[in-house]
Structure formats: C-alpha cells, structure tokens
C-alpha cells in the first residue's frame, strides 16, 4: 500500500519502516533469511534517504534489525558487527552518555550476542547496563516489556557464568513481569521463553521434575502460538531442553525421542544441509544420548558430525568450547570401543583447544559448550590411553 502511495522507487521513511516491520514479522515466524532480505532493503533505503554516512535514528534501527536477524540465522559475528554499528550511531545521535531507550535496546542486543560468542562477562556487563538504563527511563518498579527483556538477558548471562541461582532469580522476575504485562493466561512468545528459561535453570540446579513441568508449559504455549505442526526454532529449543531434563532423570529413551524431534525440526527451519550452531548442538546432544544408551559407534557418528559442523562454523583451528566438548566425548567413545590411539588423539586435541582458551571455559546444557570438567576428563583420558598404548606396544 505504501508503494502505491509514494511510488515503487520512492525513497520515503514510511516505506523503510514498513520494510522493517515486514522483516520483524518474518523473524517472528522463524524465517530469518526472509527477514534479512527485508532488513537489507530497509537499511539500503535509509541510507538513500538520509545519506550513506549520516548518523540517523532510522538508519541505526535498520542496522540493529539486520544485525539481530543475522544473529538469529546463526552468523553471530556478522550480527555483532552490525549491532555495534547501531550502538555507535545511536550514541552519536542521542549523546554518548545520555539515557535513551534506543541505546538501551542496542546494549541489550549486544549482551545477547556476546552470550553466544562465549564472552560471558561482556554479555553480563552489556545486559546490566541495559537493565539499569531501562529502569531509569521507565521506573525502577514498572512492569515494562523492555525491562522484562533485560531481566531475561541478565539471567542468560548468569546462566552461562554457572551462577544458576542468580540466573533463576532473574528468569523468575522476567516471567512474573511478562505475565503481569500480557495477562496470566495469555499465550505469548516472551512468556513461553521465560517458562523455558526457568525450566532450564531448575534443571541445572538438579530439579529435573520441576524443570519438566515448566518446559512442558513452555512447549504447549509455543505450539499454541506457532501451530501444533509448525517447524519453529523456539519449539525446537524447548524440545532439546526437555531432552536434557529427561536425560537427567535417567530416561535416555525419552531424551532421545525429544532430541530427534528437535533436530528434525531445526533442519526443516534452517535447511537439511545447513551448518548452524543449534543443529551442531543437537547432533552433539544426540551423541550424548546414544553414549548413555551404550551405543558408542552411533555416538561417534553424531559427535563427528557435530565436530565437523562446529569447525565449519567457528573455524578449523578456533579454540571454541563446543569443539573441545565434541573432541573430549569422541575420546571417551573411542576408549569404550577400545581404539586407544584414536582416543589419545582426540583427548590431545581437546586439551590443546582448552589450553588455548587459558581455562576460560564455560558450560550450559542449552549451549552444549565445554565445561571445566572436560579439562580433567581429557587429561585423565589422555593418561589412560597413553598407558594402554604403552602396554600394547
């Protein structure tokens, strides 16, 4: 309609805004490639209207929208670069030290991205700055959607720093605020996300039964929102988290069922042959499930697929915690299969990867990252494998 009003080739702010809204709509539906297409047009149009190098709020918004779309598609570095440009532009427009909702939004988005780029302290810092700014703007005790988002982000950062009690505290605050905003019985994506995150924290704190209750509520709400048979990445994440909780209860068959559903759904969303961090996580978790069931050759197959995909995403020689986790578990699996030379090789690679990170290793059941225990496991495995190889020789 706006094209018909202003003309097909018109450069008008209303058209740019409409493109941004369409991109956001596609993002909510889980089609982030289509969202990127609209946000790229939005950014291009804003630059035509305001100037290629001009700092303008609409251009900054377009940078932010495009950055978050790339982040959700799995290209975290591209998302970071675009969102950093958005923050810099917003500070130029509104003032570097000023309190403004757009600056707070940029800080929040950067906090989210840094969680996935494994700089958890930076993630926590950005998320807390955003929360503080939003409370200054809207009021300390105001139930506000933006404040609820930042409470959730602070919880996510604490979860990645292993402080699951603090994470649960912030996730519950976010859940309560979102319920007060959207009404107790309303099915809303933000409420479903908070239920999911509370469930994950309960699982991390050793309460899988309580976790399953929250996760089932989240799954039911997401299916109500997106459709019972819709392939959506938010549904797939909760299926994965239910698998983790059932695995903690010792029901590895149930865990495997949820993981297979989740992996199948993510491949429908992102593409059967697409390398994506969330698919790599699910392949890794499928390896863990088969390992617990004693099917070590099958677990090797999944761990190898996860390792190959993670190296493709993060780089062959990158010291990424997920890569270290895959290597350690491959070492464990080959030890069970009594191929000690292969086990030795994987343990050695895992230790080297972890030493490159100088001990800065974190773990989450949601992210599938390496934990400090993998340092010890890889070291012990390396020693045992070398002893056995020495005896055999």
Image (spheres, rainbow, N blue to C red):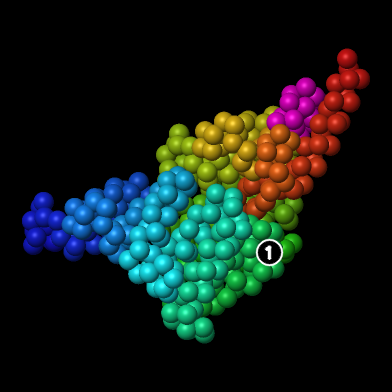
Give the x, y percent position of residue 63. Answer: 34, 55
Q: Is residue 9 left or right of residue 22?
A: left
- Is-magenta flag for residue 336? yes
Which residues are drawn in magenta?
A: 332-349
Task: Give the crowd class for mark 1: few <14, some 14-19, many >=20 residues within 10 Å.
Answer: many
Residue matched to label 1 = 164
Give the x, y percent position of residue 274. Answer: 45, 37
Q: What residue appears at the point 48 percent right and 37 percent down from the top-left corner?
A: 275
Q: What residue appears at the point 21 percent right and 54 percent down from the top-left corner?
A: 51
Q: Is residue 283 above or below residue 391?
A: below
Give the x, y percent position of residue 129. Answer: 52, 69
- Is-magenta flag for residue 132? no
Q: Is residue 314 above or below residue 31?
A: above
- Overall secondary structure of the magenta section: helix
Q: Is residue 231 left or right of residue 344?
A: left
| Secondary-structure class at tag 1 | helix
Q: What residue appears at the point 47 percent right and 63 percent down from the top-left corner?
A: 107
Q: Nearer the viewer, residue 117 or 196?
A: 117
Q: Nearer the viewer, residue 44 or 344?
A: 44
């Amino acid at each position: 309609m706006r094209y018909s009003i202003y003309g097909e080739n018109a450069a008008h702010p209303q058209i740019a805004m409409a493109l941004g809204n369409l991109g956001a709509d596609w993002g909510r539906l889980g089609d982030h490639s289509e969202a990127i297409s609209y946000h790229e047009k939005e950014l291009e149009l804003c630059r035509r209207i305001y100037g290629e190098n001009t700092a303008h709020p609409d251009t900054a918004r377009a940078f932010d929208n495009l950055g978050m779309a790339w982040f959700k598609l799995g290209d975290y570095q591209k998302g970071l670069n675009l969102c950093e440009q958005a923050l810099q532009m917003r500070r130029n427009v509104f003032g570097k030290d000023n309190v403004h909702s757009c600056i707070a939004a940029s800080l929040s988005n950067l906090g989210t991205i840094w969680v996935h780029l494994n700089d958890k302290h930076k993630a926590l810092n950005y998320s807390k700055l955003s929360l503080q700014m939003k409370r200054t703007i809207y009021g300390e005790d105001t139930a506000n959607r933006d404040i609820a988002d930042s409470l959730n982000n602070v919880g996510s950062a604490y979860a990645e720093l292993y402080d699951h009690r603090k994470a649960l505290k912030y996730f519950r605050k976010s859940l309560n605020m979102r319920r007060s905003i959207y009404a107790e019985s309303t099915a809303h994506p933000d409420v479903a996300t908070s239920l999911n995150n509370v469930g994950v924290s309960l699982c991390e704190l050793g309460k899988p039964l309580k976790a399953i209750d929250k996760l089932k509520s989240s799954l039911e709400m997401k299916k109500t929102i997106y459709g019972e048979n819709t392939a959506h990445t938010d549904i797939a994440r909760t299926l994965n988290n239910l698998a983790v909780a059932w695995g903690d209860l010792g029901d590895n068959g149930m865990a495997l069922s949820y993981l297979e559903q989740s992996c199948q759904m993510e491949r429908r969303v992102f593409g059967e042959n697409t390398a994506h961090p969330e698919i790599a996580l699910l392949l890794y978790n499928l390896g863990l499930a088969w390992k617990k069931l004693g099917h070590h050759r099958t677990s090797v197959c999944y761990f190898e697929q996860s390792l190959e995909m993670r190296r493709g995403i993060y780089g062959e020689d990158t010291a990424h915690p997920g890569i270290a986790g895959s290597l350690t578990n491959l070492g464990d699996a080959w030890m069970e299969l009594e191929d000690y030379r292969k086990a030795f090789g994987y343990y050695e690679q895992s230790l080297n990867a972890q030493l490159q990170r100088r001990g800065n290793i974190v773990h989450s059941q949601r992210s599938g990252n390496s934990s400090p225990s993998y340092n010890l496991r890889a070291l012990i495995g390396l020693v045992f494998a070398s002893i056995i190889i020495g005896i055999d020789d």
